[in-house]
Image: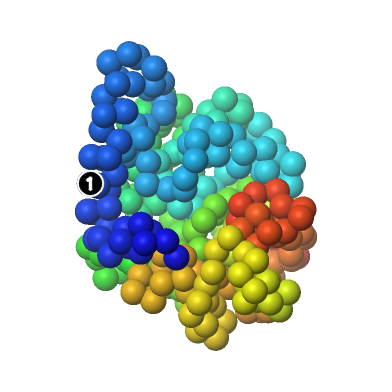
């Protein structure tokens, strides 16, 4: 792990957001003064998820959903861990009046921005702030994801998407979320979820230093990059996840191993798994 990343993880969630706002303030100020930034794109200092070009990433996720998860303009979409609208923004130009979008996230600032900038203009887009504890993003509550019930009816969504969500959650939380996903997905629906997946081949590559990320701390069914902030980066063993899919009557349709593990057929940086109802 780089020294910069390790130092970043030592900060509290609120301090991380503040440092980012300060770091990007000159660029965001310049964008505002020159009118270069679209009102539908958050300032750099407010973007707390992922790295790289925010718009490019959002369009990439949309492309994956169309290609691998059967997304159509009339689909009902649930975006779990929706952040500050990375996927919602391109979906505003993709979903038609028959389609619908629901997203929730544990970072209130992101949800507030989405409600103001997106939901205020598009009536079929809804965003909820859910106050859940997380080592990386939220220390202000003791409510845990393992007991959270998604606030949606059974069989409500054609498409469920989680990008870099299970990479920041512990096993009991993942177990609950997989069950909730199964509950809210319609028959024939698809779920696109990203992971850091670990199997014997990937472990062997990791031990030889042939992967872009190294998870040094083995904890049984999962591995950690940093013990001090457990939910900063979490990798899961594939056999553990398969037991969860079976438990909740989900079928693994496809796996596309990611660039992070130096797969020669990657479609994204993280591993992409496509699930459906059995």
Q: Is residue 44 left or right of residue 55?
A: left
Q: Is residue 85 above or below residue 204?
A: above
Q: Residue 162 in the image: state x and y as whole percent.
A: 55, 54
Residue 278 on image: x %, y % = 75, 65
Frontmost residue, 54 versus 116: 54
Between 85 and 202, the residue placed more toward the observer is 202
Q: Residue at x 50, y 69 (%)?
A: 234
Q: Nearer the viewer, residue 27 or 185?
A: 27
In this rendering, does residue 174 appear at all? Answer: no
Quadrant hosting residue 198: bottom right
Kindly identify which residue carries mark 1. Answer: 18
Residue lying at the far top of the rendered structure: 34
In this figure, which colouring scheme has been used for the structure? rainbow
Which residue is located at x 45 percent, y 27 percent?
122
Q: How many dots with numbers?
A: 1
Q: Helix or strand or loop: what does disc 1 sit on?
A: helix
Image coords of residue 158 (percent x, y): 65, 47
Q: Quadrant of residue 20?
A: top left
């Amino acid at each position: 792990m780089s020294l910069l990343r390790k130092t970043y993880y030592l900060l509290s969630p609120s301090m991380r957001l503040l440092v980012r706002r300060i770091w990007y303030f000159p660029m965001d100020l310049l964008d505002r003064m020159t009118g270069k930034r679209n009102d539908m794109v958050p300032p750099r200092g407010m973007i707390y998820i992922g790295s790289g070009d925010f718009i490019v990433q959002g369009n990439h996720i949309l492309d994956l959903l169309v290609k691998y998860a059967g997304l159509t303009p009339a689909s009902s979409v649930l975006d779990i861990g929706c952040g500050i609208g990375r996927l919602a923004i391109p979906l505003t130009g993709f979903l038609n009046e028959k389609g619908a979008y629901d997203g929730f996230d544990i970072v209130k600032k992101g949800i507030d921005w989405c409600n103001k900038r997106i939901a205020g203009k598009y009536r079929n887009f809804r965003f909820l702030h859910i106050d859940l504890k997380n080592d990386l993003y939220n220390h202000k509550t003791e409510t845990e994801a393992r007991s959270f019930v998604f606030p949606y009816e059974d069989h409500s969504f054609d498409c469920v998407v989680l990008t870099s969500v299970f990479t920041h959650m512990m096993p009991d939380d993942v177990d609950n979320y997989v069950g909730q996903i199964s509950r809210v997905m319609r028959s024939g629906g698809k779920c696109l979820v990203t992971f850091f997946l670990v199997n014997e081949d990937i472990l062997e590559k990791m031990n030889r230093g042939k992967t872009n990320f190294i998870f040094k701390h083995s904890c049984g069914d999962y591995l950690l990059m940093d013990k001090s902030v457990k939910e900063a980066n979490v990798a899961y063993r594939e056999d553990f996840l398969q037991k969860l899919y079976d438990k909740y009557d989900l079928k693994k349709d496809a796996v596309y191993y990611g660039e992070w593990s130096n797969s020669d057929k990657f479609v994204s940086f993280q591993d992409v798994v496509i699930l459906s109802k059995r």
